[in-house]
Amino acid sequence: MQFYKRARPSPPSANAGVHLSERAFWGHLNLRGDSRNETFIEAVHSALAVALPVTPNTSCIVSDVAALWLGPDEFLILTPPGEETKALNRLQARLLDHHHALTDLTSGQTIIHLSGRHVTDLLAKGCSVDLDARAFRAGNCVQTHLAKANVLIWQPHESRNFEVIVRRSFAEYLALWIEDAAQEFGLFFYPHGSIEQTEEQLFLTGLSPAK
């Protein structure tokens, strides 16, 4: 794991209530523009084939690209590792005639993947947002604090798995907090690259924006 230097792979355990891994190399692009402008939305769609979510705290996934709502005029675009430059260039070409801001945040952010039957119990220890399945559904995302770290928490699909997007400078601190907070549940740590590719791709499965 890139941020968690002192961590070691945990022995497989059916009793572990929380599973942790890192999606270290995904591309992160911050896009700002007027989501009320239909031609802006269409330009992004023509560049990436993904519709920008206009409903607050939702997301959209098409093929291998995800778009997350951060605000009325701000979005996070996630791409597979190494694809962020291509996505950025396609967006820049399509948005030449549109007022916008586009920033590559890939080197400054990482994703902590959390799953397991006690994952919501763990997150509740450090986050005030209600992540219960009745309130937080597939496709929802929210900017909040987790153990005093600024994060974006995202549930990409129906499974109760969460992607915690955090600045790299806070990532090791957050991983150590998770290690401590998960003691009562048991923690299974996957080193980077050890999860099967099919599981790594789980959140890129054609998810539509949450209603």
Image (tube, rainbow, N blue to C red):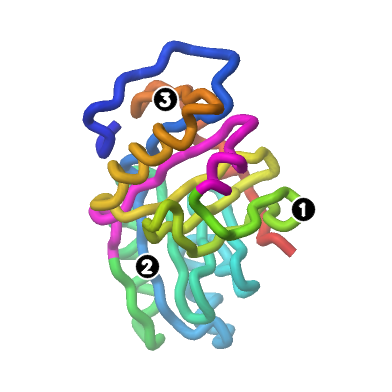
**CA gap, disc 2 to disc 3?**
29 Å
Residue at left 72%, top 57%? 135
Mark 1, secondary structure of its residue:
loop
Residue drawn 52% across the image and 55% down it = 127
Which label was assigned to residue 134? 1
User: Tag 3: Cα neighbours inside 10 Å, few (<14), some, or many (≥20)?
Assistant: many
Amino acid type, mark 1: Arg
Look at the numbered disc 3 and give the secondary structure of its residue: strand
Residue, disc 3: 189
Magenta residues (range): 104-125
Q: Position of residue 108 (x, y in %)?
A: 25, 56
Tell me the number on the disc at residue 30: 2
Q: Quadrant of the C terminus?
A: bottom right
Specify the farthest residue to the front: 184
From the viewer's perspective, tell me whether residue 170 is left or right of residue 71: left
Q: Amino acid at mark 3?
A: Phe
Residue occupying the far right of the picture: 134
Distance from disc 1 to disc 3, alpha carbons, whole Å, reads 28 Å
Mark 1 vs 3, N-terminal side: 1
